[in-house]
Amino acid sequence: MLEFLTKRKTAVSTGISLPVLAGLLAAAIFLAIGSLSSGTFAQQTVSGLSQGAIFGSLALALVLIYRATEVINFAQGEMAMATTYIAYQLTLWHLSYWLAFFLTLLIAFVLGVVVQLVVIRPVQHKSVIAVVIITVGLFILIDGLVTWKWGADLKFMPAPFGNTVYHAGGVAISRQDIGVFAVSILSVVLLWVLFQFTKLGLAMRAAALRPAAASLVGVRVDAMLAVGWGLAAVLGAVAGLMTEPTQFLQPTMMQAVLLYSFAAAVLGGLESPAGAVIGGLALGVFLNLFGQYGKIGGYYLGTSELRLPIAFVILLIVLLLKPTGLFGRRQVRRV
Amino acid sequence: MALLELDNVTARYGPVQALHGVSLAVGEGEVAAVLGANGAGKTTTLRAISGTVRRDGTVQFAGKRLARTGPDGAARLGIAHVPEGRGTFAELTVWENLRLGAYTRRGAMKDDFARVQTYFPWLDERRSQQAGTLSGGEQQMLALARAFMQRPRLLLLDEPSLGLAPLLVTEIFRIIKELNESEGLTVLVVEQNAHIALQAAQNAFVLEVGRVALAGASADLQQHESVRRSYLGY
């Protein structure tokens, strides 16, 4: 009786389209060939990946909150900065770097949950713009509190990965670049595992995608949103701690990073977690290579002053050509 | 004893009162139908039971007064509500939809999935397909399967026939009846298609402007003059 139902084949939409996949593959091959033929190119690529991984993890935090709450959390970078200061304080109390690191992630989770419960939840169902304004307010509040407590001058934490530099066939790669890349990507992968393979992760995805239907199967949607903010804060803390070795501690350390991450998230498609991470990596590598080789018609455009504007030129181009981002999903649905 | 009992339940959407005091009872192991014209409050009645809409009055479930804990609380007590639009998680896979059905339960879902497959054999080969790409009939069956995974004591079904071809509607109601008979599942179904609803249900309630206007055994209602004229069309 039901045979006619099972025979028909239905196209399943995937997150990534063929041209985009081909483009990414071509870019990867280009990077590999370039790295093999030039030591400088290889060095720039590796440190670009390391920076890009930071953009990716903070971009993922933005995407997590965007998917669940439908707003960009403008305070994400400042929350990351504040938690990095907490880690700094812990090391001042003679905790080892890595103990402070993991303790900070725990504290970040709690802070994220508290922020959602105390300041976001009361206005969440009222209007999107109210939530946006709250996050901007949080930005200013956190910035003020941190400056008041720790001051605006540069602070330094112990180097988490040491200062070793590896030499491989004329290419110098710092242990720090590798470590930053590994830690950022590992945190992203762990989060992906949580979302993809655990009951909690499934419930969080359901709550973000279809809150009404999720509550009907017994999911506490409000609790899931709070956990989502907590996890985003953890990712932010990782991004902050991994930014510290190159930018050092100061209240403004995450502001540019947040803007790059925002560009990365839009590049990948604001709805797509994988897109955010790949967008971050692509942006990190591109900016580094452009900084090295960015000479157009006799003008050197790769100066550090132009880094942020160039990131936003890319953002603009993406929004004009493919508004849903590289990984934007065209919804295929039958009713 | 009645598994579900509503006494003078009212509900409103902002200034609009949707239920003006609904009282009804559904016995354990029974299939009951709610009939009525558009806007009579059929959907709202289900929403009031599951707590999707704020209600006043009392709802007794399994001998206890149901607290207003919201839909997730009702789900944990064993009420499965398949809403209008079927509550499909369109972006997730068929398998993830079923896992969400079993969300309130602990332990492995293997045995339940095996049982579900006896009703819906096609589910297994489609388990990694995105649920939104299923046809309407398949989505309705997935909704039933998802509700079954919850192992509810009471199943609330909102318009299972909506948008489906007649052949599929018959099939869906055959499965509902089978679930009721072999699993002992109590079902309260809201349905536009009075004809098929009265065939599947033992008892029925006719709603008019937010109140139960008529209640009784399906067989009696089928003979009732005004039901025949208004809802059965002969």
Image (tube, coloured by chain):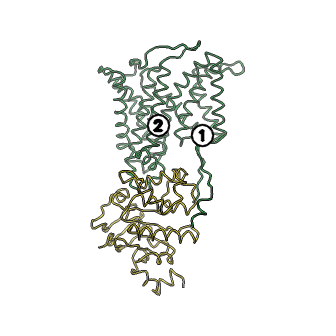
Residue lying at 49% horizontally and 22% vertically, measured from the top left? A178
- Chain containing mark 1: A
Considering the numbered disc 2 on the image, is that residue within a helix, a strand or a loop? Answer: helix
Q: Nearer the viewer, residue A318 or A252?
A: A318
Residue A139: % across, % down? 42, 34
Residue B189: % across, % down? 44, 70
Which quadrant: the C terminus of chain B?
bottom right
Which quadrant: the N terminus of chain B?
bottom left
- Provide the letter of the chain coloured green: A
Callout 2: few (<14), some (14-19), or many (20+) C-alpha neighbours within 10 Å? many
Q: Which circle marks residue A54 in the picture?
A: none
Considering the numbered disc 1 on the image, is that residue within a helix, a strand or a loop? Answer: loop
Between disc 2 and disc 1, whose residue precedes?
A: 2
Residue A218 found in image quarter? bottom left
Using the rendered image, report if marks 2 and 1 lie on a common chain: yes
Residue lying at 37% horizontally and 36% vertically, measured from the top left? A109
Q: Which circle marks residue A325 in the picture?
A: 1
Q: Amino acid at mark 2?
A: Ala
Residue A119 sits above or below residue B7 on the image? above
Q: What residue is pinned by disc 2?
A: A61
Task: Please indicate whether residue B57 sits to the left or right of residue A275 in the image.
Answer: left
Residue A150: % across, % down? 35, 23
Q: Amino acid at mark 1?
A: Gly
- Provide the letter of the chain coloured yellow: B
Residue lying at 30% horizontally and 61% vertically, measured from the top left? B67
Q: In the orientation shown, which residue stands out farthest toward the left? A: B64
Q: Nearer the viewer, residue B172 or B203?
A: B172
Callout 1: few (<14), some (14-19), or many (20+) C-alpha neighbours within 10 Å? many
